[in-house]
Image: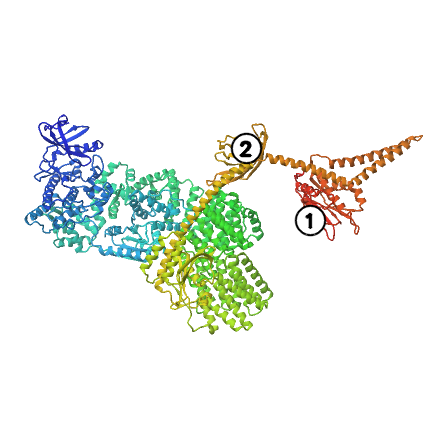
């Protein structure tokens, strides 16, 4: 298209030759010259084809505005034409060149002033024509040769009527985004969208200021490190200030510099308000410059006119309050402790403004500051202000570069850990950064507040730095919800880091939040008052741009009407402007007002009424919408507003536009509308009817409830759920249908659960009550039978319990138990009731409730079970807990059955009260828990029960190794399954039971780890128990009493914070015990008696453990005070409660104290006392056998007392000395002291006065080292000779406050950090330490679990310092052990010299041996843990180490600890790398050997993946099965298919059965090769669980064909040999056998002759002949039986397995041997007493054994003539399962060394024997699963016996087949 003015059209433009003047990346200006006429024209076109659309938009927008443009100040387009691929705008060539051509060089001031005047005039004309340019850059201003300036590039310009928007209407993009590449350098802060101001005429003036700055200085006023990064330009324009021009370029007059700076002000209200005002000042400058060459200073903008009532931004007259807040921040930073500040003042006084100003002042220090605001209409939403505060922080993080955002994600993930989910429930915005926190470990609901505290402390820690605390600002705390009040109070009260500065603002000092806060911590008050008249005058002066003095009357009037309230002042002035009582006059060049009319103006003294009056001027639809908004809270998101009021976003914006214009609401960057002040919200809500309020709440509540239902499970945001519940609770009357009422009731049930999880118990109770109200509206199930009604009532009882209403909760729980409900619901209520009784210390009732709850689940327990019942149940599970079975617990799956899980939960609840009522019940409960675990699967409580079972077995059975194994396994199971909530609960029993097998340092380490885990995971109950465990173990270890008392103090802080009264009493008891040992009024046993009422619970039950410890501590003090009679009475009381502390270390104290008390009695012990004393001695000795390092000194001390009482003076003394040496070596100073004291008494009895005095003095010194100053005082009072007036060796425990030689520290630090090799690092460390400390000798000691280890020793010689690396155990001759123990245990420097205070360890053997020695021991700390020590000494100079050196050495040691750790890691890395190389080398060699070994042994290896059913085969296995060499894997069925058809079914069955049970597989089978040959194979497989829980098998297959053939040959040879042996044996009985056969033959001949005679008679005698024939037949049968028997013994037949009567076999063998027996004159005595003589086996083989034994017996007695020859054959039943047959003789017998040799093959004592008979007999008997043995008889003879089972499938070996 072309314009009608007659400019060239598109065709004519082709005749022009164009040259580009300039381009900004979007639009390019070009000058064209006509080829023939020389006529010139300027066009604007797209700079490239990529930006055609943007360029076309700008060209068309400019052309549309051409009617408003004039040639004298603008480039006016004459037309637009199609050109090339786009369009072009055409201009007359009168514009000159763009201003950018003058840059970047610096221009003269005069020329700049001329350009500035021309540009300002052009801008003034632009604005007066009703346009805002919005893109003023050096490319937009054109200067011709005459210096005339015009403005162009109106592509972004808009009319002022639409210029209030930040965005261009055509595209909706921010203007800066559509500008060219250079445009961001010239955009105003309003262009960035980061301010609350719209782009207007003042924005153009800002851009002009940038251009003028650049012309005058040659550089931009603001810079960006990366000019291509828009974000950096945005930050610069909003947050950076330019350097004043006159400071950058001295030649520039200051007045001109101030004009430019005014143009560049970030706040539009402080800039020039019009181009006309700027033009006036520039003309003044031009005149002065032309006249004098200088410009006199003047105030810029004096003649400028404001655009309206521009109220000042920022803080006014609050410098004092801001200073107080800054001082509070400084105190928190310095003191490292949390502080609370209360900011109080009436509404509108400026509290919010002060908070934001304070937060802004902290930004340069990079302090993370969160600001939240409570909402009066959302007090039912827990933690809403805290959530809002952290939402702001999250949004700040999301605005950072990607790398920093990822770093924050990692930081939050690591910092919050398992508590991340809980932190997200409080601050949901955290999910924008991390959406996959691990789930929160399950824990008791009563600890929810503890978990919330941990989560919030960890969240605060994430935003804190050691030198920079976190700042939390909560506005309008008078509306703070109760959970937030409680949480903030706990956060500030908590002593542990990180420190927190909490600033709360309230309208009055009596707000609930402040009252609760003041009850917890001191609160610093900052009170804000109204403005003074002077301040109001200054505010008016800045607003009206009039001197304050002239405004004093108006200021006085405004102050009188507003009382100086800042918000009221602003609202009042705005009202005056609205009512035209305050107007700006151009003629008068200022604001005009009439005091009299203002004074008569109707006004109100109530801020809310004034705001309401202003709201009344808004349109009705706007007012109604604002009232509805107020119901939804201080701010509401767009979607909720549109859904609630049923309008579109466009309509919403239109309806709220008047409110935005009036400054009532604002549109936040996140698209939410918010009231500008809570007073506005209150006023808007005041105009809303009650019915309308409920209706709006219902509609909004339904919308939010729909969002909740659309989400799944835990993905529902808590804040949405709480907000929906709160709104629906206000609309209860409008919900009429039962269905909706029931749905809403479920919603409230869910909200109550979430609120309880977040420790918002009060809110949860409110949700429960609302839910029950809706259940009543549903009117379908008014009783508790409905599951939801029952669940709500259970929730109510739980909330009452957690809020401390125990009586109400208990009553309701009791009622619920009687209601019909399913088993799981009943179990849940029972569990709650058990916890209630336990919390009330009603342990008996808790036990009864638990037992009743378990009965419906099939678990029947007695409140006082017998020991036999306990033993029986333990015997059923003990085999499964054996050392080889216990690791299988790792493979137990998680319990899946809900009822079993409920039963475990109830058992877990039972165990705590049971431990205080009956030890058998507690033991039975743990056994039952483990039984369920082993049967049904693993659960978290199972780990605690396993650990406590370890305690019980130590106590009941003295099975210390088993107990420690259980405890360690429980700890490993917690780690394996991630049961972090149970970490402390397993460490508590582990530290208790480990004392019996481990060093006490291990027990204390476990206890401290348990304390840390309990606090970290919210298990405060266990943490409290760990506190007193630590103290008790430290007592037994012999730690200094002052250190123990400090530990008690730390424990009391934890316990009192948790509110655990019972443990607090125990700690107070321990404290009084320590004080009793230290008091000058020693003994003070009565001081241990606490208030009796204080030690009883509500039901009058006194803690059994407390009773035990109470009487034990009293007895100990009385014993040390030499009052054994009173101590014995206390011990009798303690004995009744000893059961309550099973396997506790105080069991040692009890037995030791009782033994020493009995021994200390003035009279000789009676028999009962003797028995008790000896029993205690045996018990302590048994403990010493299990843990010598721990208990040997105590055992020796008691045994010394026994020896003394028994009159063994020398034995007693030697044992005393041994006890002292052992106690000293192990650091048990109190035992050494008691041993010295007892030895002193013994020496005194023996009349050894000097020895007694020496031992007494040593006892006094050791008691002093222990810290028992009371005991020391008593000893010194009784023995004045102990007091030595001479100078003692001195001692110092450093506190680290001495001055430091900084240069030495730097040098040492550099030397230590530069070295990485461990050996060289140690050399440097020791050299530096000895040089700086002027020491002669030094030791580097490392703490290891097995004890301290000396790693390096350094000595000074004439050649210098020499360092030797060693690995020696710490010994008493290497250093003073007392110094070392003190430094290690206290974590502080220990020093010996002449200038320090008295040394309680003056008797240390090392120091006595080196009296002139000065020494210092510095602990090496890493993360507050002692990892080693540096010991230095000088024997030449007594005061070698000064206090100044101490601090230096401490720093060196600290640096060394870090460097050593790094070096050790590096050394370990080198070692690991070398080891890995060796392993890889060995692995390669092993693989080669494996391949060769498989090939040689014909063994192939395989791996079977059951999940994929794939066999992975080795090369040899593929060869055996004739598989393709390239086929490395096959399926199982393919594997089976290659087996012999007859073996496949059996193999499948074996494999299936074993795989199902994860058992090893062993099977033999055959395969048929392709050549038809059969190979025998043996396969072996072992299960191998994979990391992902799947199962694999690995194994081998061996070709055993050759072995099978060899075995068959061996069996055949064995059978032949057995047959030969039988024949040989039978041959030895030839004479006997011949006799046995001859007898029937002779009888046959005789009877035949007689029969013939009877028949040859004349009258044959038939009867007698018949008798003869019958005799012949009988004798023939007899001979035949004998022959058949011999045949069976000698024939080669297969064995036949059948029942065999051994008695008949014996008789049969005796028949065969009868003649031989008679020939040798041997008497046979049979004692066949076995009632069941039948066994299962091969009769022939068993007869062979009997025959062999009988023949051997006959031969053994053949040469004996001096004694009777008797053979005894005896049978008997053994253990009811086996039959034993023995053959004994009275022959020569066998020697002891021949008992086993006689069974060896080829061993014989006979001249003609083979030596195989007995060997074959043993193989036969073993084949029948029996045993054959031999034994000598006294005085002569021998006995051979075999035993075989009565029943069993025995397989004879000699001739068996496989």
Measured in 3D between alpha carbons, the distance from the residue under mark 1 to the one under mark 2, in whole angstroms, is 47 Å
Mark number displayed over residue 1520: 2
User: Furthest-top residue in view?
Assistant: 11
Indicate which disc, 1 or 2, sits on the residue closer to the N terminus.
Answer: 2
> In the visual, does 132 lie left or right of 1386?
left
Quadrant in which the C terminus appears = top right
User: Furthest-front residue in view?
Assistant: 1359
Residue density around tag 2, few if under 14, some if 14–19, many if 20 or more, within 10 Å: some
Question: Is residue 1076 something one can see in this rendering?
Answer: no
Q: Secondary structure at mark 1?
A: helix
Vertical order, 1581 against 1225 (above or below) = above
Expressed as whole percent of the image width and height from the top left, the position of residue 641 reads 28, 40
How many numbered marks, from 0 up? 2
Residue at 55% across, 60% down: 1181
Q: Nearer the viewer, residue 1451 or 1573?
A: 1573
- Color style of the picture: rainbow
Q: Nearer the viewer, residue 1796 or 944?
A: 1796
User: Do the residues under discs 1 and 2 have CB atoms within 8 angstroms?
Assistant: no
Question: Is residue 1234 something one can see in this rendering?
Answer: yes
Expressed as whole percent of the image width and height from the top left, the position of residue 1718 reads 81, 44
Expressed as whole percent of the image width and height from the top left, the position of residue 123 reads 12, 40
Quadrant in which the N terminus appears = top left
Vertical order, 195 against 997 (above or below) = above
Residue at 70% across, 47% down: 1830
Expressed as whole percent of the image width and height from the top left, the position of residue 1599 reads 57, 35
Q: Nearer the viewer, residue 800 or 1000?
A: 1000
> In the visual, does 79 lie left or right of 1227?
left
> Label 1: which residue?
1794
> In the visual, does 534 lie left or right of 455?
left
Q: Nearer the viewer, residue 739 or 1679?
A: 1679
């Amino acid at each position: 298209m072309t314009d009608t003015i007659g400019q060239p059209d598109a065709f004519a433009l082709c005749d022009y030759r164009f040259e580009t003047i300039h381009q900004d990346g979007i639009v390019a200006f070009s000058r064209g010259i006509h080829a023939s006429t020389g006529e010139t024209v300027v066009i604007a076109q797209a700079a490239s084809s990529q930006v055609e659309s943007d360029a076309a938009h700008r060209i068309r927008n400019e052309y549309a505005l051409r009617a408003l443009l004039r040639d004298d100040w603008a480039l006016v387009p004459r037309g637009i034409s199609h050109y090339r691929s786009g369009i072009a705008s055409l201009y007359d060539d009168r514009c000159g060149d763009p201003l950018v051509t003058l840059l970047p060089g610096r221009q003269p001031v005069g020329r700049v002033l001329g350009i500035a005047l021309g540009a300002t005039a052009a801008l003034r004309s632009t604005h007066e024509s009703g346009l805002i340019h919005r893109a003023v850059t050096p490319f937009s201003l054109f200067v011709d040769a005459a210096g005339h300036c015009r403005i162009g590039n109106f592509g972004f310009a808009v009319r002022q009527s639409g210029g209030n928007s930040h965005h261009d209407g055509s595209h909706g993009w921010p203007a800066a985004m559509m500008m060219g590449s250079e445009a961001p350098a010239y955009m105003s802060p309003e262009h960035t969208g980061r301010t609350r101001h719209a782009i207007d005429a003042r924005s153009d003036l800002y851009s002009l200021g940038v251009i003028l700055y650049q012309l005058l200085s040659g550089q931009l006023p603001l810079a960006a490190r990366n000019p291509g990064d828009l974000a950096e330009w945005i930050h610069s324009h909003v947050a950076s200030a330019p350097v004043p021009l006159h400071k950058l370029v001295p030649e520039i007059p200051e007045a001109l510099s101030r004009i430019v700076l005014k143009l560049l002000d970030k706040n539009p209200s402080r800039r020039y308000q019009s181009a006309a005002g700027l033009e006036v000042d520039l003309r003044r400058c031009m005149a002065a410059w032309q006249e004098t060459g200088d410009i006199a200073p003047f105030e810029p903008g004096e003649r400028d006119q404001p655009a309206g009532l521009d109220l000042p931004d920022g803080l006014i007259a609050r410098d004092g309050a801001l200073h107080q807040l800054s001082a509070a921040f400084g105190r928190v930073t310095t003191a490292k402790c949390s502080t609370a500040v209360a900011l109080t003042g009436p509404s509108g006084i400026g509290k919010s403004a002060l908070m934001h100003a304070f937060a802004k002042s902290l930004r340069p220090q990079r302090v993370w500051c969160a600001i939240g605001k409570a909402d009066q209409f959302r007090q039912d939403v827990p933690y809403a202000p805290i959530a809002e505060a952290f939402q702001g922080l999250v949004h700040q993080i999301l605005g950072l570069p990607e790398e920093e955002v990822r770093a924050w994600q990692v930081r939050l993930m690591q910092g919050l850990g398992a508590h991340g989910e809980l932190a997200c429930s409080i601050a949901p915005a955290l999910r924008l950064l991390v959406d996959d926190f691990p789930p929160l470990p399950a824990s008791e609901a009563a600890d929810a507040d503890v978990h919330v505290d941990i989560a919030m402390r960890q969240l605060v820690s994430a935003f804190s730095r050691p030198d920079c605390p976190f700042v939390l600002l909560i506005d309008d705390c008078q509306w703070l919800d109760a959970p937030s009040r409680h949480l903030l109070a706990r956060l500030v009260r908590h002593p542990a880091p990180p420190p927190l500065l909490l600033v709360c603002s309230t309208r009055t000092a009596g707000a609930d939040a402040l009252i609760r806060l003041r009850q917890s911590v001191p609160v610093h008050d900052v009170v804000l008052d109204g403005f003074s008249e002077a301040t109001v005058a200054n505010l008016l002066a800045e607003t009206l741009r009039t001197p304050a003095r002239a405004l004093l009357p108006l200021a006085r009037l405004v102050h009188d009407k507003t009382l100086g309230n800042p918000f009221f002042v602003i609202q009042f002035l705005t009202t005056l402007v609205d009512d035209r009582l305050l107007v700006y006059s151009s003629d008068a060049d200022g604001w005009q007002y009439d005091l009299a009319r203002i004074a008569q103006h109707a006004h109100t003294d109530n801020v809310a009424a004034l705001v309401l009056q202003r709201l009344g001027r808004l349109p009705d639809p706007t007012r109604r919408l604002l009232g509805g908004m107020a119901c939804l809270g201080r701010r509401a998101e767009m979607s909720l507003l549109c859904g609630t009021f049923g309008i579109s976003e466009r309509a919403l914006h239109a309806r709220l536009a008047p409110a935005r214009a009036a400054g009532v609401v604002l549109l936040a960057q996140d698209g939410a509308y918010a009231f500008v002040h809570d007073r506005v919200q209150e006023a808007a809500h005041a105009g809303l009817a009650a019915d309308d309020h409920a209706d709006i709440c219902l509609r909004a509540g339904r919308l939010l409830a729909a969002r909740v239902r659309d989400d799944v499970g835990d993905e529902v945001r808590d804040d949405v759920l709480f907000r929906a519940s709160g709104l629906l609770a206000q609309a209860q009357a409008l919900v009429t249908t039962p269905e909706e009422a029931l749905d809403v009731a479920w919603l409230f049930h869910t909200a109550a659960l979430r609120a309880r999880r977040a420790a918002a118990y009060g809110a949860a109770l409110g949700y429960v009550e609302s839910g029950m109200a809706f259940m009543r509206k549903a009117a379908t199930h008014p009783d508790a039978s409905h599951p939801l009604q029952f669940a709500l009532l259970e929730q109510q009882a739980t909330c009452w319990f957690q809020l401390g209403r125990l009586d109400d909760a208990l009553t309701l729980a009791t009622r619920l138990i009687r209601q019909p409900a399913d088993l799981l619901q009943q179990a849940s209520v029972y569990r709650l009731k058990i916890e209630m009784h336990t919390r009330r210390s009603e342990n008996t009732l808790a036990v009864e409730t638990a037992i009743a709850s378990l009965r419906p689940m099939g678990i029947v327990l007695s409140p006082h079970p017998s020991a036999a019942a306990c033993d029986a149940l333990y015997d059923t599970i003990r085999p499964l807990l054996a050392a080889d079975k216990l690791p299988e617990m790792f493979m137990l799956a998680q319990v899946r059955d809900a009822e079993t899980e409920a039963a475990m939960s109830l058992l877990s609840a039972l165990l705590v009260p049971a431990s205080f009522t009956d030890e058998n019940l507690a033991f039975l409960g743990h056994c039952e828990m483990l039984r369920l675990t082993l049967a049904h699967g693993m659960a978290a409580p199972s780990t605690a029960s396993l650990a406590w079972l370890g305690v019980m077995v130590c106590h009941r059975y003295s099975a210390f190794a088993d107990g420690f194994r259980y405890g360690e396994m429980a700890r490993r199971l917690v780690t394996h399954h991630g049961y972090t909530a149970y970490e402390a609960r397993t460490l508590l029993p582990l530290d208790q039971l480990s004392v019996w097998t481990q060093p006490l340092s291990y027990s204390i380490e476990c206890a401290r780890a348990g304390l840390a885990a309990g606090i970290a995971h919210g298990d405060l109950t266990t943490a409290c128990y760990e506190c007193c465990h630590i103290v008790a173990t430290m007592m037994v270890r012999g730690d200094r009493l002052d250190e123990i008392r400090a530990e008690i103090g730390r424990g009391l802080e934890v316990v009192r914070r948790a509110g655990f009264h019972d443990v607090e009493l125990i700690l107070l008891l321990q404290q009084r015990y320590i004080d009793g040992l230290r008091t000058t009024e020693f003994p003070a046993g009565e001081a241990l008696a606490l208030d009796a009422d204080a030690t009883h619970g509500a039901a009058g039950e006194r803690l059994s453990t407390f009773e035990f410890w109470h009487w034990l501590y009293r007895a100990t003090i009385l014993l040390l005070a030499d009052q054994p009679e009173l101590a014995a009475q206390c011990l009798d009381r303690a004995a009744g409660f000893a059961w309550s502390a099973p396997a506790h270390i105080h069991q040692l104290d009890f037995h030791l104290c009782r033994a020493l008390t009995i021994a200390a009695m003035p009279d000789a012990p009676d028999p009962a006392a003797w028995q008790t004393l000896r029993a205690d001695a045996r018990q302590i000795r048994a403990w010493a056998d299990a843990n010598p390092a721990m208990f040997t000194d105590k055992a020796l001390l008691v045994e010394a007392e026994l020896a003394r009482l028994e009159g063994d003076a020398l034995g007693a003394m030697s044992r005393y000395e041994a006890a002292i040496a052992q106690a000293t070596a192990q650091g048990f100073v109190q035992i050494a002291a008691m041993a010295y004291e007892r030895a002193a008494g013994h020496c005194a009895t023996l009349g050894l006065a000097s020895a007694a005095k020496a031992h007494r003095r040593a006892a006094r010194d050791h008691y002093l080292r222990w810290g028992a100053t009371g005991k020391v005082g008593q000893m010194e009072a009784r023995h004045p000779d102990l007091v030595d007036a001479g100078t003692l060796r001195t001692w110092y425990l450093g506190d680290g406050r001495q001055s430091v030689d900084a240069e030495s520290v730097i040098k040492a630090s550099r030397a230590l950090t530069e070295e990485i090799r461990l050996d060289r690092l140690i050399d440097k460390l020791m050299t530096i330490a000895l040089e700086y400390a002027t020491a002669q000798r030094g030791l580097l000691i490392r703490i290891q679990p097995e004890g301290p280890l000396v790693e390096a020793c350094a000595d000074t010689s004439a050649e210098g310092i020499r360092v030797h690396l060693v690995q020696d155990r710490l010994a008493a001759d290497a250093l003073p052990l007392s110094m070392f123990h003190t430094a290690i245990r206290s974590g502080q420097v220990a020093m010996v010299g002449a200038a320090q205070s008295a040394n309680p360890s003056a008797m240390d053997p090392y120091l006595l041996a080196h009296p002139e020695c000065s020494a210092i021991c510095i602990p090496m700390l890493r993360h507050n843990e002692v990892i080693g020590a540096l010991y230095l000494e000088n024997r030449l100079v007594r005061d070698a180490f000064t206090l100044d050196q101490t601090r230096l050495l401490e720093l060196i040691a600290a640096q060394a600890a870090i460097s050593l750790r790094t070096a050790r890691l590096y050394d370990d890395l080198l070692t690991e790398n070398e080891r890995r190389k060796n392993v890889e080398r060995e692995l390669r060699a092993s693989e080669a050997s494996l391949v060769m070994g498989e090939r040689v042994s014909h063994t192939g290896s395989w791996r079977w993946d059951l999940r994929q059913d794939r066999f992975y085969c080795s090369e040899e296995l593929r060869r055996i099965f004739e598989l393709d060499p390239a086929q490395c894997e096959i399926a199982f069925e393919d594997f089976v298919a290659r087996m012999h058809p007859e073996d496949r079914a059996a193999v499948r069955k074996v494999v299936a059965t074993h795989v199902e049970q994860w058992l090893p597989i062993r099977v033999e089978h055959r395969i048929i090769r392709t050549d038809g040959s059969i190979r025998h194979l043996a396969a072996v497989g072992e299960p191998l669980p994979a990391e992902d829980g799947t199962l694999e098998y690995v194994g081998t297959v061996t070709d055993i064909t050759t072995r099978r053939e060899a075995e068959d040959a061996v069996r055949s040879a064995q059978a032949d040999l057995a047959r030969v042996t039988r024949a040989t044996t039978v041959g030895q009985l030839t004479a006997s056998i011949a006799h046995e056969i001859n007898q029937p033959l002779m009888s046959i001949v005789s009877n035949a002759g007689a029969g013939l005679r009877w028949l040859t008679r004349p009258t044959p005698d038939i009867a007698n002949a018949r008798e003869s024939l019958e005799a012949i037949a009988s004798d023939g049968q007899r001979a035949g039986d004998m022959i058949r028997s011999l045949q069976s013994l000698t024939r080669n037949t297969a064995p036949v397995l059948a029942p065999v009567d051994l008695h008949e076999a014996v008789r049969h063998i005796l028949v065969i041997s009868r003649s031989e027996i008679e020939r040798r004159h041997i008497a046979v005595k049979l004692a066949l007493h076995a009632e069941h003589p039948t066994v299962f086996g091969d009769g022939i083989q068993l007869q062979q054994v009997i025959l062999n034994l009988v023949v051997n017996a006959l031969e053994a007695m053949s040469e004996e003539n001096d004694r009777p020859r008797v053979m005894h054959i005896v049978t008997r039943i053994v253990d009811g399962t086996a039959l034993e047959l023995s053959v004994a003789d009275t022959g020569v017998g066998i020697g002891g060394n021949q008992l086993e040799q006689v069974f060896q093959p080829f061993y014989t004592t006979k001249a003609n024997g083979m030596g195989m008979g007995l060997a074959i007999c043993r193989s036969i008997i073993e084949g029948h699963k029996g045993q054959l043995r031999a034994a000598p008889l006294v005085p002569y003879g021998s006995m051979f016996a075999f035993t075989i089972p009565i029943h069993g499938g025995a397989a004879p070996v000699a001739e068996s087949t496989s």
